[in-house]
Every structure is written in C-alpha cells, then in structure tokens.
Amino acid sequence: MASLIELANPTRFMRLSAVLLPWMLGAMALALAVGFYLAWFVAPADYQQGETIRIMFVHVPAAWLALMFYSMMALSGIGTLVWRHPLADVAQKAAAPIGACFALICLLTGAFWGKPMWGTYWVWDARLTSMLVLLLIYLGIIALWRTLDDPSRAGRAVAILTLIGFVNIPIIKFSVDWWNTLHQPASVFRMGGPTIHPSMLWPLLILALGFTLLGLSLHLIAMRAEIMRRRVRTLTILEAERLDRLAAQGAPA
Amino acid sequence: MSRAFIAILRRDLALAARAGGGGELALVFFLTIIVLVPFALGPDLNLLSRIGPAILWIGALLSMLIGLDRLFQSDEEDGSLDLIRASALPLELAVLAKGLAHWLVTGLPLALAAPLLGLLVALPGAAMAPVAGTLLVGTPALSFIGAAGAALTASLRRGGLILPVLVAPLTIPVLIFGVSASNSALGGTIPFLTPFLILCALSLLAIVVGTVAAAAALRQAE
Amino acid sequence: MSALGPHAGFILASYAAVVLVLGGLIAAVLRDHAAQKRALAALEQRGAGRRSDRAAS
Amino acid sequence: MSEPHRFAPLRLRASGLACRRGGRLIFEDLSFALAGGEALALTGRNGAGKSSLIAMLCGRLRPAAGEVALDGADDAPLAELSHLVGHRDGLKTALTAQDNLGFAQDCLGDPGLTPLAALERVGLPHVAALPVGYLSAGQRRRVALARLLVARRPFWLLDEPMSALDLAAQAMLSGLMQEHCRMGGAILAATHGPLGLAEARELRIGA
C-alpha cells in the first residue's frame, strides 16, 4: 500500500512535467536567442575590458545558477528529511550534475576571462576559490549518490550531506575571504561593480533567464529519467521474483 | 590463458565504470588536495608555481592510495578471488591484470588531468608536459607497489587503515625522481632525462616486484 | 564577428567551453532519459506492469 | 543433453591430514579417497573443520600434517581441476548473472555450457540480464551453482550447497550432482542435510 501512495505523486509529476516542458523549452529558446543577440550585437564593448566583457554574459549566469541549484538541493534535502516527500530526493539527485556543470562553466569561463585581464588563468581570488570549493562539494555529493546503490538510503545520506554543505558554504566563504585579504590586501580585481550600464544589464538578465529555463528544463528531464529509473529498478526485481514463482510452480508438476 | 587475463582486465574495467568505481573518486580527491594546499601556503602564485610539480606529485600519490585497499579486498570478500586462484592462469598474471586495470582507471586519468590542475598552481607552460609525462610513467609504480600492499591487507578487516602506512614509505623513491624530473624541466643543472629514466626503471621494477610480491601474499592468504 | 579585439581567442574559447559542457550535459540527460524510457517500455511489454504482476500472483 | 563427455579417471587420496587454526587442532589423522564417479558427503558438527578441509583441498589452507595426492592427473594441481562453491558465492553484485558466469568461464577454462544454457539448467533463464545484486539469496546461490556447468572440471567441492535453496532447487541440484557422477566426476560436499544422492558415502569428521 505504501508503494502505491509513493507512486501516485511521481505519476502526477510525470503528467505535469510533460505538459510543462514544451512551454519551458520554447521560452528558453526565445530568451537565449534574444539574449545572445543583444549580448553579441547590441551591447557595447566595455571601456576598460574591451570585448572580453562578452564572457561575462555566460560567466555570471553560470555563477548564479550554480548557487541556485545548490539552494534548490538544500531545500530538497529538507524535503527529504522533514517531510519525506518522495519527489524531494529525486529532485536533489537530478540537480547535482546540473549544478556542478554550471559551476564548471563558471570556472572555465572565468579562467578564459582571467587570462587576458590578469595575465593568468587562475588566481586564488576569494570569489573564484569559493566557486571551486562549491564545485568540490557538488562532486562529493555526486560521488555519494553513485556509491550508495539503494536510492531510499542514499536519499537521506545525501540530504544530510547537502545540508551540512549548505550550512558550511557561508563559513567557507567567510574564511576564504579572510584568508584572501590576509594574503593580498586590496589588490583584488573589482568586477564591473554595481554600476553596470543598462545596455549590458538587459542582455545579462535575459540570458540569465534563458539559462535558468535551460537548467530547469534539464532538471525536469533528469527528474523524469530518475523516476523512470527507480520504476525500472522495482519492476525488474518484481519481475525476477514473479518469473521465479512461475518457474517454481511449473517445476514440481 | 590469455583469455582469463583479458577477462579479469575487462571485468575490473567494467566494475570501475559501474557506480562507485574508484577512478573518478581519485580524480576528485586529487582536485581537493590541489585546492587545499594554497589555503595552507597562501595564494602567492610565484611560490605556488615554484612548488607546483611537488604539489601535483603529492596529490597524485595520495589519490592513488584512495580505494587501493579495495583492489583485492572486494574480491576476497565475495569469493571471486577463489575463482581467480582456481584458474589455470598463474596468480602473477592475474595480479598483473588487476594492477593494469587499476592503473587504467586511476593513474592514467590522474596523469591526464595533471596539466589542467596545474593551472590552479600556476604551473608554467614548459612544465606541463614534463609533469604529465612523469606522472604517466610514475603512476604504474604506485599502482603496483600499492597492489603488493593491498594483497597483504586483503584478508584484514581493517586493511584500509594500515595500507597507506605500509605503502607510503615504499613510494619515496618514485616521489623523489618524479618531482626532480618535473623540476629539472623548469631549469636547473640536471638534465630532464637523467631522473626521468631512473623513474622509468623504478616503474618497471615495481611492476615486476609488486606483481610477484602480491601474488605471493595472495597465495598464502591463511 | 571579426571585431572581437585582441582577445578573440579567449572569448571564443569560453563560449566553446559553454557549448561543450552544456552540450555534454544535455546529451547525457537526454540519453539517460531515452534509455530509461526504453527499459521501462521493454519491461511493460514483457508484462511486468504493476497490474499484471498482481494478477499473476 | 550436452554431448557425452566423460572425465578421465582420477583418484584423490588424502592421508593423515591435520588442520590447525589459530593454534587449535581442529582435526587430525584424516584419511579418505575419492575417485571419479563417487560422491562424498562431509558431515560433522559446526566447527568440526568441514570448510577448513575444503579450503585445504583447493589450496587455500596448508595442512598441518599429511598430504593430498592426485592420481591420473599429469601434474595439474587439484585447485585447477576443481570447482568451488562456498559460502562466498564469488559473484559481483554490480554485474549481470550472465556476465558473472561469462567471467567464470573465461577464468576457469575448458568451457562447458554457455552461461545462458547454464542458467536455464538451474531454472533462472529470466535473470540473465539482471545485476546479481537484485537477486534473492536463493537465486544468487543458484547462479553460483550454474558456474559448475559453464566450465568442465572433474572435482566439485561444495560447501553447504543446499543452504538457501527451496525444495525444487534442491531437487535440481541433486539432479546436477547425479549427472556429474555419471560422467565420471567426483563430488565432495560439506552438508548438514541429505544430498539426494543414493550412492553417496559419508565422511564424518570431528567425531
């Protein structure tokens, strides 16, 4: 009976997500097309950084999304631990690789931006370093998912790890900042600053929306795949037992 | 006979590709160590770039030890080692197959990833190929020295704790010549090839000695 | 496109990284989705649906 | 069923075997012979050394005294002529039943039935493509027993082969063992219950 209740909810999710997905994909395509058009052909080059500012249009959304997906995972973690919602750990498992990919994109584009600006692919700047640590936490979570075979057990373990990480991230950020200022006082490169020109802000926001929609669509698809994977798993075990029973009934006769 | 060799190699690669294989974990651990070092030393890129090869080598060495304890232990626990022992294939060749598989899923990715992680410690471009090269020829030594240790601890329940303590001292020569070969590429009085060839020799020696020692340890399990 | 200035290589490289990483992610997610869908369809065709299972036992 | 294949006549002689583990003498002065076509049921209370004897025969454990000799085999050690199915089933949970059996076949050499055919004989053709980790204890035991069929080896060393098996599977295993004896193979099985072999001799150890 418990399994029936468990299945009901994901079934509704499968229906809902199938309806939702085309709309999200359409909106995503529109936002990305408009955003990239504005970013490449309309936005002016920065007076300080020249054309390399074009990297910002993918770098910054990736950083936002890496953080957003981690926050989503932390929420799902609470969902798993507190409400034991059957979809929560599915959402969490599906989010981890996507968040890790955005963190990776943020780091890679940052490196390609840093080389012409600072003369090196990497500096141990507080912001970059924190993103690298976030990537490491993502990788740890993915590794834990892959190591624990049984999804129901893995869900709780990973939820706890995610929440520990979530509590830790501000502490890590704070200590990295402290460590960083300790070593290189005030020599850190200032990125854009809050006074970003509207001709750059709009493409940035639209692109951020597009990437968010892309990430969320991927998340939905990955969740659907995960739900199906679990169904395949249970059905396979049931199937093996059923055929075994049939064979056992047939054998003595 | 070669069929059994290939079967062991293929099975270990397949197991590594399945969930929880040690290969990608070693890579993540490698990255973690490289990230940790600057927090201790400070972010001074000049300093980091000078000791970059050393950091990478230490990181690679420690990452090789991750999951090494499972090399024979998992086979011992579920009884597949009995299967391998019952094979007509000499145990030495079986160990060779398993060590080779371990290197392919652990050492090779580490060596290939090293130049990329070298960026984090501002490794000069001239040093990237030498560091990757030394890791490429040096990690087999780590795999096979480790295999001997893993065979010794295969039937111990807490073997995973003892293993690094047993193996780490044995890897000192590899570390010395690996780092000095990488450093000599950055300048200095020693030509690159001198330590590099010694490193190659150490690797070949470790493959032979490690294989024989591991097989001997597995043979007299009790 | 030619007006990317002296750092065109880096700009293109970073966009290439985006395409590569996201493309890989999209391909992996879609492939996994298709594989699970196939596996589920194959199972249901073999009559392992929940209803038929209950009927059999 | 499979092509008629008889094993070359072999004879296993154990004389004066003693087993010492952790300084404790488990059994001593154990002698027996086992020839092709025979089955030997190894009985005794728990801890009498049944598993130790099997470990000794397959070369995992050195006897404290005595020796095991093999007549009729040219120099091949007993371990390479025997199948071992023990408490540890030697199956990788992440691999499918078929892959596990394929690996065993490649490892052990002298191929007999194909993995699929062997699974069919033990009544599990439907789990061939399933990871072994999904299977129940009885199913796993039967996959491990299917290993006896994928490679042809004259000696079967079985440690509690009937455990975890239901009645139908026990009958199936008895059938397999009878057939193996008819082909000239020899069986040594540690057991608490009956093996279902009429002609099996009993070797009781530990008194």
Image: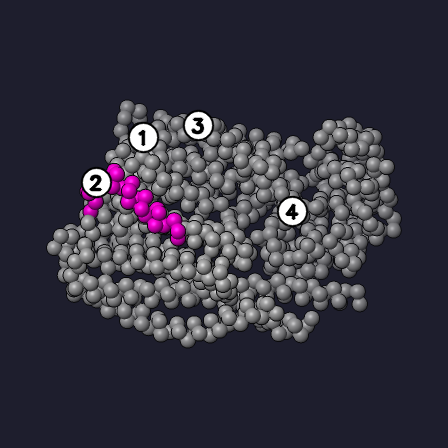
Location of residue A149 with respect to B172 vertically, above or below: below
Spatial CA span between label 1 and label 2: 31 Å
Q: Secondary structure at mark 3?
A: helix
Q: Quadrant of residue A240?
A: bottom right
Q: Mark 4 = which residue?
A: D90
Q: Mark 2 = which residue?
A: A185
Q: Residue furthest top?
A: B189
Q: Mark 3 = which residue?
A: B172
Asked if marks 1 and 2 touch (Cβ < 8 Å), the reply is no
Spatial CA span between label 3 and label 2: 38 Å
Q: Nearer the viewer, mark 3 or mark 2?
A: 2
Using the rendered image, report if marks 4 and 3 lie on a common chain. no
Q: Chain of mark 4?
A: D
Inspect the image, locate mark 2, and give the three-letter code of the amino acid beneath it. Answer: Pro
Give the class, few, some or many, for how many residues have Cα within 10 Å of label 4's Cα (few <14, many ≥20).
many
Query: Sequence-wise, which precedes: disc 1 or disc 3?
Result: 3
